[in-house]
Amino acid sequence: MNETQKTTAAFGVIALLLLIIGFAQSWNVALGILNLCLISAVMALGVNMQWGYAGLLNVGVMGFAALGGLAAVLVSQAPVAEAWRGNAGGLLLAAMCFAATVFAGIFTYRRVPVGRTRTLALAAVIIAGLFVTRFFLDPTIASIESVNPAKTGFLGGMGLPIIFSWLIGGFVAAGIAWCIGKVALGLRADYLAIATLGISEIIIAVLKNEDWLSRGVKNVTGLSRPVPYELDLQSSAWFVDLMRWWHADALAALADGARSEALKQFAIDGSSIFVKLCYTGLFASVLAIILWLSVRALNSPWGRMMRAIRDNEIAAGAMGKNVTRRHLEIFVLGSAVIGVAGAMLTTLDGQFTPTSYQPLRFTFLIWVMVIVGGSGNNAGSVLGGFLIWLVWIQAEPVGVWLMEFSTGWLAEDNALRLHLIDNAQHMRLLFMGLVLLLVLRFSPGGILPEVVRKRS
């Protein structure tokens, strides 16, 4: 079986599994899983750029996803006029003091000779700058957070369509990644992993505690949508007519009194499916664009250079390649893609919940997607995103069925049977480990391993 046939067969199996879920459970469930699979695939592509292209071990995936989610809030929420009134000056002064501190620190680092004097001078500049910045910022934050904290208590956003946040989320994540990369990319691989995990925790801690920016643990709900609302569809004549046409046979078999109630229910069910299909179209378009760009980049001279650096940094450096700069490029690009996925996820949820970003748990999932799908293979990362999320979501209902089936010979009120059924959700950990073990045993390069084409 060649590469194209293997890829087609693998994605055919995923499509078959989604169809089975649709027929066996519901199409609402199947489409909901499909949308999350598409977002997971985008996130896996970002990690694959960093690890598969350049061998960079980024364990701070959730931090960059959270930045994308924050972008959705800052772009789509309407500005809180009362919070801005009287506080804009304080924010501006604090920002100017912070910027002056950064520039003073850079100036001191570059101009003062290396030694104890530079260390003390740099420390003095940073400490003094932070004190001055906090002097203006703290009372301003207190004033902002006191503005109707039950509903707002933050600055709000720009009031733009939320779909713009997907692009802004990528830029925000890329900017933070550049700052991190300038400091951390000189570290050894294991230290880089620890550093990115720590930075991810810091980002999420800031989002949890800085209420003036993102409402913290009070969450931001009711974010705008790029697709219609179900209630609007149910009251739209064109959509009701569409449901009447789609279910014409079923409605014709009913009496006049039951027909209107059935049509109402069809409109309710159909509106949810229609909204999910709209999200599917948007997410699939983003995934297709990023995948196309990723494949083009990987097959370009730049992509071949990145793989050469990944395989042997010393040899690439000896040939005149700036390894650190190329690592910074790919780290920023991969983080930008993760930020886009984070903004998409917040858009789908309709709310921003900082506590839901769990770095160790979900970073592990994204890494499993890349490893199982095939590190260094863009199609493999997309496949891994679909497969692992399917396993993660469906492990619980499959686990419940498995426990009920295997304990069917026991009495209904048997303590062991009830305990196993109640804890069936933990089967997802067993299934995840089993999938990872089987793939690493029989296909160490992943289901769709990287294909290196030799040029003559």
Image (spheres, helix red, strand yellow):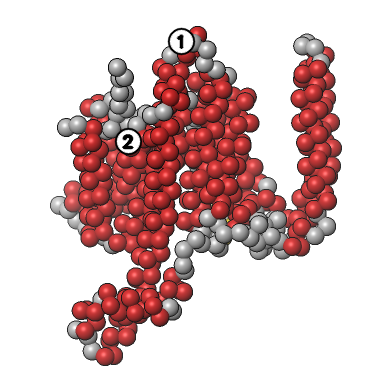
Q: Secondary structure at mark 1?
A: helix
Q: Position of residue 166 (x, y in %)?
A: 53, 49
Front-lying residue, 208 or 133: 133
Instruction: Return the residue nearer the eye: 430 or 3.
Output: 3
| Placement of the N terminus among the 4 image quadrants | top left
Q: Residues within 10 Å of mark 2 (few under 14, many from 20)?
A: many
Q: Position of residue 152 (x, y in %)?
A: 67, 61
The image quarter containing residue 451 is top left
The residue indicated by pointer 2 is: 380
Q: Which residue is mark 1?
A: 315
Mark 1 crowd level (few <14, some 14–19, many ≥20, 10 Å Cα)? few
- Counting residues from the start of the chain, the first of labels 1 and 2 encountered is 1
The answer to whether residue 47 is above or below residue 95 is above
Residue 301 visible in this rendered orientation of the protein: yes
422, 188: nearer the viewer:
188
Q: Nearer the viewer, mark 1 or mark 2?
A: 1
